[in-house]
Amino acid sequence: MRPEHPARAVRIGIGGPVGSGKTALVAALCRALAGELRVAVVTNDIYTTEDADFLRRAGVLPDDRIRAVETGCCPHTAIRDDISANLDAVEELEEDLGELDLILVESGGDNLTATFSKGLVDHQIFVVDVAGGDKVPRKGGPGVTTADLLVVNKTDLAPLVGADLGVMARDAAARRGNLPTVFLTLVGDPGAEPVTAWVRDRVAHGVDPAAADHAESAPPHTHSANAEPHGAGAG
C-alpha cells in the first residue's frame, strides 16, 4: 500500500555480518514488493560488484533501479560516518526515476556494531544467521540491540549447527525489549513474508516529517566512497 502523498521514498537500511543473507533478503523483498510499490536499491561493498551483480542476474528489478557504492573502507563508514556516496546514489535514483515509494540501502557485511545514520535511512533492519551460533543475540552490539527489526536468518540450518532457536529468541527479547525480532528461512519462505509485511507497513505510514527534516539537515561529508551510477558500481 502506497502512502497517499509521499514526501519522498521511505529508506530502509539492511545491515548485518558477511554471509548472513542480506542480499538474498533484499532480492526477496524486491520480488515481493515490486509489483505494488516503486522500489529501488543501493548496495554497498568494499571492492567488488558482487551484490549488485547478484540482484541484476536474479532480475528482481530493472537495472536502472539498482545503484552500487564502492566503499573502499569498512562498510559502516559509508552508512554511518561518511554517508555522502550513499546519499548521492539515493538522490540519483530519485532524480532519474522520479517518484519512488521505497529505497532499500544494503550495507556491506560488517560486525555487530554496524548501524545506519539517521541522515541516510528512516528505518534499520539487522540480519544475523544461525550459523554464527545461538550466542549471537546475547552478544548484543548496536546492530542487534537498536535495529528497528532484527532478523534471525537461515533457521533451516539450526539443527545442522546445533543452534537453539529458543535461546536466540529469549536472548533477543532480553537485549531488545519491545523491538521486534523475526525468525526466517528463505528456503521455506522465499517471499520473506514477516519482513515483507513489516516493510509494507513502514511504507504505508510514509516518512516522519521530523525524520525527513533531520535527513535534509544532515551535515555535509567528504567523499571517501564512490557511487557508481546506472548499475556500474560495486555491490
Image (cartoon, rainbow, N blue to C red):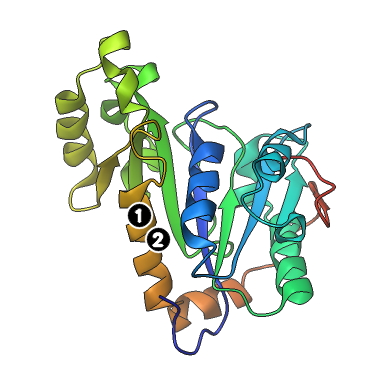
SS class of the residue under badge 1?
loop
Q: Position of residue 126 (x, y in %)?
A: 42, 43
Q: Looking at the rendering, which quadrant does residue 183 occupy?
A: top left
Give the mark nearer the N terminus: 1 vs 2: 1
Q: Which residue is mark 1?
A: 148
SS class of the residue under badge 2?
helix
The residue shown at (72%, 33%) is: 50
Q: Position of residue 43 (x, y in %)?
A: 66, 47
Q: Is residue 14 visible?
A: yes
The disc label shown at residue 235, or none: none
For badge 2, the amino acid type reads Val
Residue 75 position (above or below residue 200) = above
Residues packed near mark 2 inside 10 Å, few (<14), some (14 to 19) or many (20 plus): many
Q: Position of residue 1 (x, y in %)?
A: 40, 75
- Alpha carbon separation for disc pair 1 and 2: 11 Å
Q: Which residue is mark 2?
A: 199
For badge 1, the amino acid type reads Asp
